[in-house]
Amino acid sequence: MDIVRQTFQQLRRDYAMSEYEYSQTWLKKSRGYFAYLKCTNSEPHASRPFSAKVARMRHSAFFVGIGAVLLLSLILSGCGVRSIPTALNEVEATWSEVLNQYKRRSDLIPNLVNIVKGYAAHEKETLLAVVEARAKATQTQVSTNQLTPESLRQFSQAQAGLGSALSRLMVVVERYPELKANENFRDLQVQLEGTENRITVARYRYIQSIKGFNNLITVPPESWYNSWFLKHEKKPQFSVEDEAAVKQVPTVKF
């Protein structure tokens, strides 16, 4: 009986079949089918699986795969998959706000020039300087994709030139009390003051967003993901001698 049992077990290992298939094979080879039943004390059944171990291995592999996917997701989420695009969106949003506030200032200037011209028509040189500075600032526009140290420098210079021209104009206005008392002029003065304050706030927010983005793409582990997949480069910053002054919104007085 031991020999029969050993032979059957060997067949089971060799052919990896169900017990029913094993029994049929054994019957054909040795005519020992009933001896097998007596040894195993079981009725062969075609639907019985050939190995519970294989089924357990399949289930284990399934759960191991799910775990690996979850682990990979956690690793990537901490390596810039979401944080870097989010920071880039913040940069684009803050830069758009900077552009919007500078545009708002430019839109106020034509009305300001027309009002001043009505009271100080002979101040042509000062008025012309404002008009030319506005034209240059309007033409110098930089989108987020075009932001480079050079393009940002040109943009800042154009906007600074317009600011200087406006300051000189306001010095001239001081010599015309009637102009200062004009209601429309005073309304524009208030709007320009508010716009200058909003420009300062927008610049500060842009500076902060650039800091966050540049840190993500240069400091591990997020920088590794950027180097391998995204290839983003550092965004340029405004050149400010005293950043603390930018953090405090000034009150612009004309």
Image (cartoon, grey):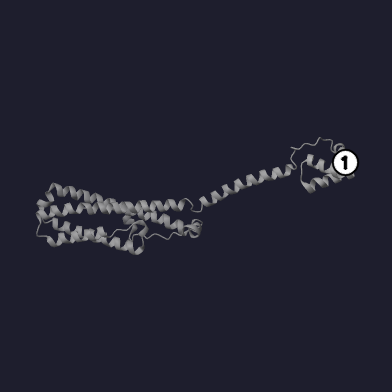
Which residue has dot 1 on it?
32
Outermost front residue: 28
Q: Residue 120, position in %: x, y?
A: 10, 56
Instruction: Report if residue 89 is visible in the image.
Output: yes
Can you say whether 239 is above or below 51 in the image? Answer: below
Q: Secondary structure at mark 1?
A: loop
Q: Nearer the viewer, residue 13 or 241?
A: 13
Q: Residue 88, position in %: x, y?
A: 41, 53
Quadrant containing the N terminus in the rendered view? top right
Q: Is residue 58 left or right of residue 132?
A: right
Q: How many marks?
A: 1
Q: Residue 228, position in %: x, y?
A: 50, 59
Q: Nearer the viewer, residue 102 or 205?
A: 102
Q: Residue 209, position in %: x, y?
A: 39, 53
Which amino acid type corresponds to the residue marked 1 in the rendered image? Answer: Gly
**Mark 1 burial class by Cα count in 10 Å: few <14, some 14-19, many 20+:** some
Instruction: Report if residue 252 is visible in the image.
Output: no
Picture residue at 21% right of the left edge, 60% below the top: 133
Q: Is residue 111 left or right of residue 220?
A: left
Task: Classify residue 158 by image quadrant.
Answer: bottom left
Q: Nearer the viewer, residue 137 or 26?
A: 26
Picture residue at 56% right of the left edge, 50% below the top: 72
Quadrant containing the C terminus in the rendered view? bottom left
